[in-house]
Structures are given as C-alpha cells and as structure tokens.
Image: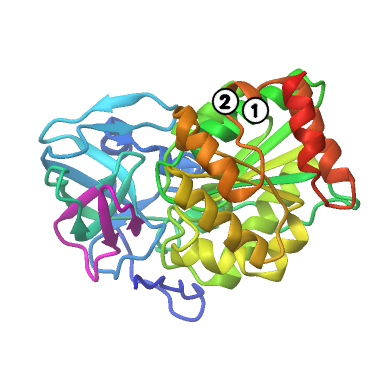
Amino acid sequence: MPQLRTLPAPLEQPHPPAVSLGRPSLEAAKLAYSTRHVRLEAVRGIRADVVPGAGDLVLAVVTEVGQHKRLELRDGRRAALFPGDEIVVCYGSRYAPDQFEAEVPPRIERCALVAAGGVAGRMITAHDRVAEPTQIKPLGVLTQENGRPVNLRDWALPATEASRPAPPTIAVLGTSMNSGKTTAAAHLVRGLSAAGTRPGAAKVTGTGAGGDVWLLQDAGATPVLDFTSAGHVSTYGVAPAEIERVMFTLHGHVAAARCDVVVLEVADGLFQQETRALTESEGFADTVDGVLFAACDALGAALGVDRLRHLGLTVLGVTGMVTASPLAAREAAAGTGVPVLGLEALEDPKAAAQLLADLSDDGQTTTETREQSLRR
C-alpha cells in the first residue's frame, strides 16, 4: 500500500541550498489543477536530491504522450500535451480500477502522469484497456525560500468544525468508480436549489481533478471543496484518522458558509480501503444524516444497501447507472426496499424537499412518504 511521507520540520533537519529556478521557466510551464491552491510566489528554487513525498510540486518534462493526452490546468482548461512540454504537477498515489494504480516513487526519476488533474507517480498496475501512461522526466521538486519542498499541505484549509446544529448532510456513496455518484450528486444539488435551499458540496476522497468540482459548481452548489483543499493530491493510502480529518475540515468549511444542506461525495466503492474505513467510522455516522447509494446493477444496489444498513446508516434511495434501465431499476427497488431515484427525480424540487423532510424526522426515512412525493 502506498505510504505517505511526513515532512520534517525545517529547524530539525534543514535542507542544503536549493538550485535556483528562474521565473520564466516556471511561468512557461503548464500548471496542473492539483497545484491550484499553491501561491506561486512562494517558489524559490528546485532540487533533485530529495526523496519525493505525496503533495510535493514537481517540475517535469513530457517525454512521451500516452493515456493522458491533456493536462487539466489550474483554471480547468484541458491543455494538449506534447513531448518537450514542461509541466508542474504533484507527486501522489492513485487508485483507479479502470485506469491506473500508482504510488509515489522512491526517488526523483522518470515516472508517469497517472491522472489528468496533474499527478506524478510510479505505475503499479493498469487496466487492460488503457494505453500506456504518459511518461515524464522530473527535473526536480520545487522548493520554498528555506529549501523545503513546496507541498499542498502548506496551503491546506485550517481544521474547523461545523456549526451546531450542523446543516442536514447527505452523502453520496457507490459500488465502484463510475457508478454515477457525481452525476447523481449534481442533479441532487439542482433539485435542492430548485426547492429554495442553498446547497454546498465537498468531495472527500479521490484523486485530484477538477471535473467533479466544476460539475457540482455548475449545478448550483456553493461553496464546493475537495480533498486538495485539505492538503492532499490523492487520498489513496492515507491513514483512516487523516481521512476523517479531511472530511471534518471540508464539512466544517462548507457548513460555515451558511449552507442549508451539505452534499458529500465519497469516491470509489464501499470496499475500497479508504472508503470502507471512513464509512465504518463513528465520525462518518455522526456527520452524515442520510445516504444516496449509486450502483451499476440491482445486485450491487442490494448488497450496498444491506452493507450501509448494517453500519447503521440511513439509506435515502438508490441512484446511479442502474437507473438507466427501467427493468434494472425495478429489480433494485424490489431488492432493496428503498426508492430508486433517477436523475429526473433527483432534480425535482418536490422530491428534493421530501428528502430533507425525511432527514428531519429523527434520521428515519419513510419510503412510502418519499414514493408519494415522487408520484406527484
């Protein structure tokens, strides 16, 4: 399992002087989404004689374009990549069953661009259907004035707690990557907004990329935060206690923006190691009032709902890819005993308002009441 490095305090283990990096070289580089919280004026140099750590910014040259032919920039634009391009990305791990599993390399050496949002890592495994990863040659880790690596954690949001009482919180979980979680969350945000509420959203786990954040913003959520705001380019391999801290931090900042409801998305599936640990934690149960569960098929929906109920979580409904098929949706409803909510239902203001009403009823959902609302 990928391991995160703990950065030493600068006074305990000072670094030797860094090699100077000229501003023109940095400004000419393509700066990835994963770096967007870093203030570039803090960059003073570059070093190639350090052990890279998760979240360190690295200047690299593209040597061969593969699976990722574009790099998502800080403003969300997806820039085409060419051999010889200089890019600034972050070292990190990745968990993506339909693409790559990757880890932070043990040294500054040739590696791969393993996520379009700007993650540099050493590939461990790959799905049979994806191309070879885009290859990059790191020139060095960017450093601050004191010689320490520039790391996302230096710009992380401070820890905070949600105001009490906290706004109602709905978590969107799923069976796997690409089960329809983000799309469902966005349509739920649309419905909540149409119902006259002010939703905020946060993506708690995953790999740094802006697509989900932009979609939730476009749907009407404000603010929208993700784990990169809490100092992580990826949450793969991060300790359970730290994942909880990320959730508390993001939830607290969204709630502090005076939202009427918070929508949290947790990446991947219930059996993914970080998702599993988070959903089994007391902190998750204390934070989340209800769950929408995205599934690809009826069997996955039934097993997932049973798992969530076993954990004592309130399941509001099943959603996701399974709703694309009326037959599969009927099977999922029969197998779970909860409503199956397609995208039209999620963005319907009456249905969204009823979901909130269910949450206010001491956390107990009433399937019959919800179904009546959906039939109006």
Which residue in the structure is indicated by mark 2? 343
- In this view, the residue in front, 35 or 276, is 276
Circle 1 is placed at which residue position? 346
Q: Position of residue 63 (x, y in %)?
A: 9, 43
Image quadrant containing the N terminus? bottom left
Magenta segment includes 80: no
Q: What are the residue bounds of the magenta stretch?
A: 93-113
Q: Looking at numbered disc 1 in the image, what kind of residue is underneath it?
A: Leu
Q: Looking at the picture, which amino acid does disc 2 mark?
A: Leu
Q: Percent position (x, y) of residue 346?
A: 65, 27
Is residue 129 in view from this perspective? yes
Q: Quadrant of the C terminus?
A: top right
Image height of 33 relative to 90, above or below: above
* Badge 2 element: helix
Q: Position of residue 9 (x, y in %)?
A: 51, 74
Q: How many marks?
A: 2
Residue displayed at 29% across by 64% down = 103
Q: In front here: 301 or 171?
A: 301
| Apparent side of residue 286 relative to residue 121 in the rendered image (left or right) | right
> In the shown orientation, is residue 49 left or right of residue 229?
left
Disc 2 crowd rating (10 Å Cα; few below 14, some 14-19, many 20+) is: many
Compared to residue 239, the image places residue 353 above or below, namely: above
Q: Are marks 1 and 2 in contact (CB under 8 Å)?
A: yes
Q: What is the spatial separation of the Cα atoms under label 1 and label 2, in whole angstroms?
A: 5 Å
Q: Which mark is residue 204?
A: none
